[in-house]
């Protein structure tokens, strides 16, 4: 059982003393670790648990580290896992091969444990910053309303609105261009598709329902004879 707030690191290393040295130093830095003496066992475990980072030796029995790295980087669900290669194979060709396969760092043996931990810290910080940027890109803010695209959730001043699929689509569409007027036909085509059997009146009904759910805030403005727009209050 691993705490959700604790970073988990796979150590794939067939030399027990080195694997233990890495693990002890990572544990001191509040990471959790799982040790594997071959890459095949690590591949099986990936189906159950996805780590935050993998420390990978290259010279492994059965399946070498480069082949392991190639396999996980070609699978969508594992491709973003950072990989740090730690190996005695320190030639320029080996380093280039590892980096071209998608490794995030390469440390030659022998190494200083503190240096390894520092590099792990830096990689995970970069991953966290990248994740924050990606998350922010999926949050649209208009006035005091936040639209979480991935969760398909809209909140106003921390109050989460209970919306239907189409109501969310309507708000999301209007939020793309606050202040711009969209005709009813444009809304129908964008939210339901051109072939969906719906009338302009249906859109009006959706807007009425939305306004009730958004009370006391009134962000949807009717432009008579044209359509609707999302008010942008400065």
Image (cartoon, rainbow, N blue to C red):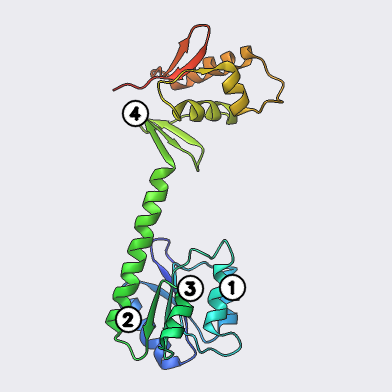
**Residue 215, horizontal then vertical, whole percent:** 42, 18
Q: Are marks 2 and 1 in contact (CB under 8 Å)?
A: no
Q: Which residue, given by chain and number where applicable, does mark 4 sit on?
A: 144
State which tag comes first along the sequence, 2 or 1.
Answer: 2
Residue 13 x %, y %: 47, 86
Q: Are marks 1 and 4 in contact (CB under 8 Å)?
A: no
Disc 4 + disc 3, Cβ < 8 Å: no
Q: Which mark is first along the chain, 3 or 4?
A: 3
Q: Please provide percent x and percent y for residue 112.
A: 29, 86
**Which residue sits at x=54%, y=65%?**
78
Of badges 1 and 4, nearer the viewer stands: 1
> Quick check: can you spot residue 34?
no
Q: Which residue is mark 2?
A: 25
Viewer-side label of 4, 2: 4
Whole-number angstrom distance, CA of label 2 to CA of label 1: 28 Å
Q: Earlier in the sequence, mark 4 or mark 2?
A: 2
Asked if residue 146 is positioned above or below residue 138 in the image, the reply reads above
Query: Residue at the location (64% across, 27% down)?
Result: 192
Earlier residue among tags 3 and 1: 1
Q: CA distance from mark 4 to mark 2?
A: 45 Å
* Residue 223, disc: none
Q: Which mark is in front, 3 or 2? A: 3
| Residue at the spot of label 1 | 71
State whether residue 32 appears in this view: yes
Residue beneath disc 3: 100
Marks 3 and 1: CB-CB under 8 Å? no
């Amino acid at each position: 059982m691993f705490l959700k707030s604790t970073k988990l690191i796979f150590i794939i290393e067939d030399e027990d003393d080195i694997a233990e040295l890495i693990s002890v130093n990572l544990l001191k830095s509040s990471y959790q670790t799982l040790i594997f003496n071959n890459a095949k066992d690590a591949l099986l475990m990936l189906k159950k648990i996805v780590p935050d980072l993998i420390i990978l030796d290259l010279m492994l029995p059965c399946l070498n580290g480069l082949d392991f790295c190639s396999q996980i980087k070609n699978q969508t669900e594992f491709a973003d896992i950072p990989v740090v290669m730690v190996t005695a194979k320190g030639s320029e060709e080996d380093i280039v091969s590892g980096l071209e396969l998608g490794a995030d760092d390469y440390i030659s043996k022998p190494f200083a444990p503190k240096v390894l931990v520092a590099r792990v810290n830096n990689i995970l910080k970069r991953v966290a910053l990248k994740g924050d940027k990606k998350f922010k890109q999926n949050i649209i803010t208009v006035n005091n309303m936040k639209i979480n695209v991935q969760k398909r959730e809209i909140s106003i001043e921390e109050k989460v609105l209970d919306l239907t699929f189409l109501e969310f689509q309507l708000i999301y569409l209007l939020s793309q261009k606050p202040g711009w007027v969209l005709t009813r036909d444009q809304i129908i085509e964008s939210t339901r598709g051109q072939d969906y059997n719906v009338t302009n009146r249906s859109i009006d009904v959706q807007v009425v329902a939305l306004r009730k759910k958004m009370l006391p805030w009134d962000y949807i403005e009717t432009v008579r004879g044209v359509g609707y727009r999302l008010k942008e209050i400065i």
